[in-house]
Image (tube, rainbow, N blue to C red):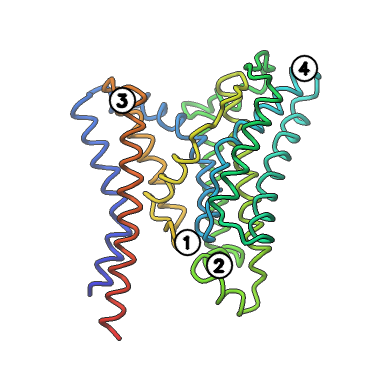
């Protein structure tokens, strides 16, 4: 009985929180409930949403990646530099930017699996490396003059729907399909639940973990290209801090910080909660620093709730035995 209650709490709590937040901000700020504002929220969360799919794969497989934020900056910076300074065609420049972040994700996985280094430490080091590379490429200055044809990726619409939101939805659909309908998705869950048991069943746990981080790199690159197109420039500090938004959105959405648990539908709700929080606080006139404090509190509460759920689950199993 208690196990069923815990399961129902996990399933519906995120949706309840999202609805409560929307009602709360709608009462305090009547213009929050406008249709245009909802499309604004969708556009604002698009990059974090794309990035969160990669973060979810990594966390479900039992890892974490603190370099996801700066990977966003790297793909946009490389693509912008090639297009503006060297006249490289848009498609080729974007592909090279995407290739760079894919390589970063791959290296993260290789370093972690070959050295048994803690993912937190390995990706923290990689985050600082990529930060430095971003500054070296840009000389610490923004890159302007992005070709207007690429801006449709970040600023365009199909009907009333922003193009970045469409990219995000496609990413979520593909991510959900990979997790739920393929053997690889099951391997991610198995690796995150119990790596030793997964290895003993014959799974190549090293390759699976490397692949998870590589997917994170690919999606980090896509998110960075969308961000570059949206702001029509490449900033040396692009993406800084976004890795914490990704972790918060994933954990709020039910992805366990310990690995092995989580669904893409929950990640979608987690991303929307973060978007509603940020937009609602902005509509109420709260500054950026207040938003950072609130997001930190949300992260602590979400991880704390996840830990408590595991404790409750362990107690229920002991009682049943």
Question: Closer to the camera, 27 or 194?
Answer: 194
Q: Residues within 10 Å of mark 4 (few under 14, many from 20)?
A: few
Marks 3 and 2, the one that precedes in the sequence? 3
Q: Residues within 10 Å of mark 2 (few under 14, many from 20)?
A: many
* Alpha carbons under labels 1 and 2: distance apart: 8 Å
* Alpha carbons under labels 2 and 4: distance apart: 44 Å
Q: Would you place residue 262 above or below residue 85 in this image?
A: below
Q: Residue 269: horizontal and vertical position, in percent?
A: 38, 46
Q: Residues within 10 Å of mark 1 (few under 14, many from 20)?
A: many
* Alpha carbons under labels 4 and 3: distance apart: 42 Å
Marks 4 and 3, the one that precedes in the sequence? 3
Marks 4 and 1, the one that precedes in the sequence? 4
> Mark 1 sits on what residue?
259
> Mark 4 sits on what residue?
85
Q: Specify whether 142 is left or right of 275.
A: right
Q: Residue at the location (38% across, 55% down)?
A: 254
Q: Do labels 3 and 2 touch, CB within 8 Å? A: no
* Alpha carbons under labels 4 and 1: distance apart: 43 Å
Q: Residue 152: horizontal and vertical position, in percent?
A: 60, 23
Which image quarter holds the C terminus? bottom left
Q: Secondary structure at mark 3?
A: loop
Residue 307 badge: none
Q: Do labels 4 and 1 touch, CB within 8 Å? A: no
* Alpha carbons under labels 3 and 2: distance apart: 43 Å
> Mark 3 sits on what residue?
34
* Alpha carbons under labels 3 and 1: distance apart: 38 Å
Question: Closer to the camera, 64 or 132?
Answer: 132
Q: Specify whether 62 is left or right of 295.
A: right
């Amino acid at each position: 009985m208690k196990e069923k209650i815990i399961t129902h709490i996990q399933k519906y709590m995120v949706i309840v929180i999202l609805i409560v937040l929307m009602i709360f901000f709608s009462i305090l700020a009547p213009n929050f409930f406008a249709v245009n504002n909802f499309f604004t929220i969708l556009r604002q969360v698009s990059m974090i949403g794309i990035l969160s799919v990669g973060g979810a794969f990594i966390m479900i497989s039992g890892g974490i990646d603190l370099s996801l934020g700066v990977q966003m900056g790297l793909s946009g910076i490389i693509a912008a530099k090639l297009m503006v300074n060297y006249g490289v065609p848009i498609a080729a420049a974007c592909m090279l930017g995407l290739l760079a972040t894919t390589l970063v994700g791959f290296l993260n996985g290789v370093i972690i699996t070959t050295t048994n280094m803690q993912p937190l430490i390995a990706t923290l080091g990689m985050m600082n490396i990529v930060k430095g590379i971003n500054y070296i490429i840009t000389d610490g200055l923004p890159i302007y003059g992005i070709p207007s044809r690429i801006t449709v990726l970040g600023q365009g619409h199909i009907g009333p729907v922003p193009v970045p939101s469409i990219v995000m939805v496609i990413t979520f659909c593909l991510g959900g399909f990979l997790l739920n309908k393929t053997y690889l998705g099951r391997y991610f869950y198995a690796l995150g639940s119990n790596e030793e048991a997964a290895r003993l069943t014959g799974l190549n746990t090293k390759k699976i973990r490397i692949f998870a981080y590589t997917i994170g790199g690919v999606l980090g690159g896509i998110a960075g290209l969308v961000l570059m197109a949206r702001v029509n420039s490449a900033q040396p500090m692009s993406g800084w801090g976004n890795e914490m938004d990704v972790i918060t959105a994933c954990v709020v959405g039910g992805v366990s910080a310990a690995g092995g648990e989580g669904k893409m539908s929950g990640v979608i709700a987690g991303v929307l909660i973060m978007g509603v929080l940020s937009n609602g606080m902005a509509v109420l006139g709260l500054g950026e620093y207040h938003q950072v404090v609130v997001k930190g509190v949300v992260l602590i509460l979400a991880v704390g709730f996840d830990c408590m759920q595991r404790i409750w689950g362990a107690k229920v199993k002991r009682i049943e035995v």
